């Protein structure tokens, strides 16, 4: 019987007889007779497997109609099915692990591909920047030069505007503070006017005139020559002492008396003669201006 079980343990006898696993002995015998009549060798002389199948049916009948043999076979069949179930679960788990591994490998490959693409993109951009870098650098340097030039022009303009003091020289006592104010108020508001006689050379005078803005001071240097019968010997724009470097200031020196042609009087300025005299500033400011004139002698 043990040899028969060893032979039968890999066969599904219930499937062979086409019966359920809980079929009773009568059902098993009835199924056997039906199958045996159908595959009997005498009825299938041309089928070489008919004899083998008939023999398997006979063995199945012997096992399944014997109580102890059937119980042993059922245990073997049950263990076999449990093992197949475990194998299927294991196969499913292995398949899942395999799929996950393949998915991770694919993701890693795609990520690596993205890195490669990103690296190639970066390389391309670096090469482009290397080609365009010199041009961009030159453009930035040119822009910086323009900004510096504009700033320089602005500073020079401000410096010119900040030069508001005039120094006037003449001979004789023709001019006093009031007359100088009348002459220079035509060009703009006049601040302090300080008249000083040269201590070294008698008969020579100078005055420091402070205009209220640089444009008026510059206009006065370019236009004003004094009274026709007593023209100025020299009129100049003093440099600003604030520390800002300025361009050379315009000056005027009177020509030789024999060749001097005084300018035509400008009637449009006559109305300025009636302007009210301004009060002098404080004595300390006047003293400072006098010292400045003496230093420029």
Image: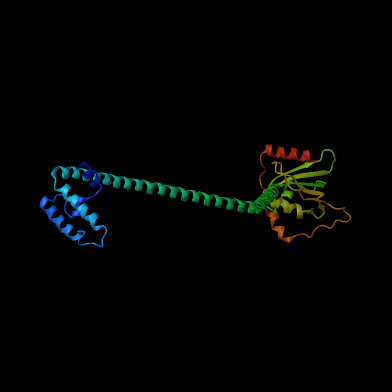
Instruction: Give the residue at x 76% y 54%.
Output: 222
* In the image: residue 281, left or right of residue 226: left
The foreground one among 148 and 25 is: 25
Q: Is residue 39 above or below residue 159?
A: below
Residue 171 % position (x, y):
83, 47
Residue 33 in view in this figure? yes
- Residue 33, given in percent of the width and then of the height, sits at 14, 57
In the rendered image, residue 201, in percent from the top left (x then y), is placed at 85, 40
Query: x, y (%) of residue 151?
Result: 66, 49
Q: How is the image coloured?
A: rainbow
Residue shown at 85% from the left, 53% from the top = 255
Q: In the rendered image, which quarter contains the N terminus? A: top left
Q: Nearer the viewer, residue 37 or 246?
A: 37
Residue 15 visible to the viewer: no
Q: Residue at x 78, y 41 (%)?
A: 296
The quarter of the picture where the C terminus appears is top right
**Circle count:** 0
Q: Is residue 148 left or right of residue 62?
A: right
Q: Quadrant of residue 16?
A: bottom left
Q: Is residue 58 left or right of residue 275?
A: left
The one nearer the camera, 22 or 67, is 67
**With respect to residue 29, does 197 lie above or below?**
above
Residue 258: name its quadrant.
bottom right
């Amino acid at each position: 019987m043990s040899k028969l079980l060893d032979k039968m343990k890999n066969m599904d006898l219930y499937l062979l007889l086409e019966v359920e696993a809980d079929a009773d002995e009568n059902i098993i015998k009835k199924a056997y007779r039906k199958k045996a009549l159908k595959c009997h060798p005498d009825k299938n002389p041309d089928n070489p497997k008919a004899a083998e199948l008939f023999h398997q049916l006979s063995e199945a009948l012997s096992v399944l109609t014997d109580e102890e043999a059937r119980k042993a076979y059922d245990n073997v069949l049950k263990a076999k099915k449990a093992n197949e179930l475990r194998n299927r679960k294991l196969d499913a788990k292995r398949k899942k692990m395999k799929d996950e591994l393949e998915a991770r490998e694919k993701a890693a490959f795609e990520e690596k591909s993205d890195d490669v693409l990103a690296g190639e993109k970066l390389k391309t951009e670096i090469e482009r920047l290397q080609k365009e870098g010199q041009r961009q650098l030159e453009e930035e340097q040119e822009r910086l030069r323009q900004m510096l030039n504009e700033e320089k022009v602005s500073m020079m303009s401000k410096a010119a505007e900040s030069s508001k003091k005039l120094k006037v020289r003449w001979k004789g006592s023709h001019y006093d503070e009031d007359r100088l104010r009348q002459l220079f108020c035509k060009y703009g508001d006049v601040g302090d006017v300080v008249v000083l006689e040269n201590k070294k050379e008698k008969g020579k005078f100078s005055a420091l005139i402070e205009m209220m803005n640089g444009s008026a001071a510059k206009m006065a240097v370019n236009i004003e020559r004094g009274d026709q019968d007593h023209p100025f010997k020299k009129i100049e724009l003093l440099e600003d002492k604030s520390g800002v470097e300025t361009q050379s200031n315009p000056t005027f020196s009177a020509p030789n008396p024999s060749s001097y042609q005084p300018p035509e009087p400008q009637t449009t300025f006559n109305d300025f003669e009636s302007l009210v005299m301004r009060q002098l500033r404080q004595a300390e400011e006047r003293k400072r201006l006098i010292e400045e004139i003496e230093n420029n002698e």
